[in-house]
Image: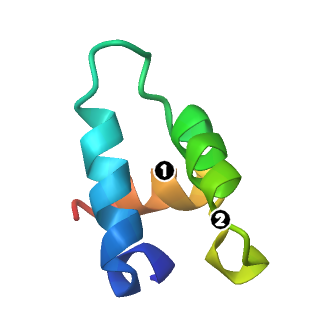
Amino acid sequence: MKINMNSKMKLFIICNLKRKDILPSPKIIAKLWNQTQNNKKNHITHTSIYSWLETGM
């Protein structure tokens, strides 16, 4: 899974899930991540985050 192979992305998702100042939905987290990435290869979708969360990682 793409998230497990990119430790920066994984840490970004985990940190944002713990945030209290926003509702940390995967859709918002994906949007925040994609805004910081210049390379389209590093983009993520909210469905990928949901799938990753369901695997228990």
The residue identified by callout 2 is: 37
Q: Is residue 25 above or below residue 39?
A: above
* Callouts 2 and 1 close, C-beta under 8 Å: no
Residue 22: x and y in percent read 42, 16
Q: Residue at x 38, y 87 (%)?
A: 5
The residue identified by callout 1 is: 50
Residue 21: x and y in percent read 35, 12
Q: Residue at x 56, y 61 (%)?
A: 48
Q: Is residue 11 above or below residue 24?
A: below
Q: CA distance from mark 2 to mark 1?
A: 20 Å
Say what secondary structure mark 2 lies in: loop
List the single residue furthest toward the right.
40
Within the image, what quadrant is residue 57 found in?
A: bottom left
List the single residue furthest toward the top.
21
Q: Quadrant of the N terminus?
A: bottom left
List the single residue furthest toward the bottom.
5
Point out the tag, 2 or 1, that comes first from the N-terminus.
Answer: 2
